[in-house]
Image (cartoon, helix red, strand yellow):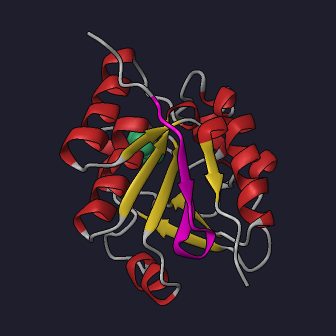
């Protein structure tokens, strides 16, 4: 099967948010409780986008998987991201700055029972760049949920990772075909110059 070719994409900073999904120690660090192999490789491209987003005053949003000790999800997955634990912390390399939005969530979808939609609306956000882990799980559910709310979704292929190739490709397919999102790459993504 032919892969989906990333294309260049230029976005209006004032109408855009960068969403960093679940880049938490339990998923990203090899000693984490639900380590996603290869997730450390997406840190540098996300870091690059994060620096450029901050420099261009693009809204930055982190999501944080945040479970009580008896979470129903622990019937499916080993215990991970228990609220307040070290594993639930965002990785040091992508540490949030004071004032940046952190959305704590108990499901795969960062819009479900959170303030995310309201926060994006009040900031006049129209485009969301979705990055992080796991591609076909929290990234896809959050991206799909954003698309169903009328937001344009942008997925840089080097800023997400899945547990296998099938799941990774499925994510790109769903984003491009089902949700009419843009498949791009961190080095092909730019922010438009602001006119004052
Ligand atoms: C996730 C599996 C279980 C994710 C969260 O962040 O994609 N995956 N919980």
Judge whether 72 appears above or below 68 on screen: above
Whether 186 is drawn above or below 170: the answer is below
Q: Is residue 164 visible?
A: yes
Image: 16 above or below 167: below
Is 189 displayed left or right of 127 in the figure?
A: right
Q: Quadrant of residue 176?
A: top left
Determine the residue positioned at 49% across, 38% down: 184
**Farthest-out residue, left:** 178
Query: Which residue shows up at 66% across the image and 69% down it?
Result: 58
Judged left or right of residue 76, residue 156 is right
| Residue 78 in sight here | no
Q: Quadrant of residue 14?
A: bottom right
Q: Nearer the viewer, residue 179 or 98?
A: 179
**Residue at the top extreme?**
1
Asked whether, in this view, residue 27 is left or right of residue 138, the answer is: right
Tell me where residue 162 appears, x and y as whole percent. Answer: 44, 28
Q: Residue 11 in magenta?
A: yes
Q: Position of residue 158 (x, y in %)?
A: 57, 31
Does residue 34 appear to the left or right of 140 in the view shown? right
Instruction: Name the image quarter holding residue 47.
Output: top right
Residue at the image position 57 percent from the left and 37 percent from the top? 159
- Give the camera-side residue of 158 and 68: 158
Locate residue 139, reporting x and y percent: 41, 47
The quarter of the rendered structure image containing the N terminus is top left
Location of residue 69 in the rendering, given as x and y in whole percent from the top left corner: 46, 57
Residue 65 magenta-highlighted? no
Q: Which residues are magenta?
A: 6-20
Q: Which quarter shows the C terminus? A: bottom right
- Residue at point 36% right, 54% down? 143
Query: Which residue of the protein is positioned furthest toward the bottom in this rendering?
Result: 122
């Amino acid at each position: 099967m032919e892969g989906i070719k990333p294309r260049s994409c230029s976005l209006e900073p004032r109408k855009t948010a960068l969403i960093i999904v679940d880049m938490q120690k339990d998923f990203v660090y090899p000693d984490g409780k639900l380590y996603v192999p290869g997730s450390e490789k997406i840190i540098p491209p996300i870091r690059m986008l994060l620096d450029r987003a901050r420099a261009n005053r693009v809204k930055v949003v982190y999501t944080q998987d945040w479970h009580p000790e008896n979470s129903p999800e622990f019937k499916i997955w080993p215990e991970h991201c228990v609220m307040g634990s070290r594993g639930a912390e965002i990785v040091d390399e992508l540490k949030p700055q004071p004032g940046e939005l952190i959305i704590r969530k108990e499901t795969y979808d960062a819009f479900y029972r959170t303030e995310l939609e309201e926060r994006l609306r009040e900031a006049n956000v129209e485009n969301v760049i979705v990055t992080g882990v796991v591609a076909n799980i929290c990234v896809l559910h959050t991206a799909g949920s954003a698309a169903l709310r009328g937001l344009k979704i942008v997925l840089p292929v080097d800023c997400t990772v899945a547990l296998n190739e099938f799941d990774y490709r499925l994510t790109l397919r769903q984003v491009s075909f089902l949700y009419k999102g843009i498949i791009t790459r961190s080095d092909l993504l730019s922010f438009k110059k602001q006119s004052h």
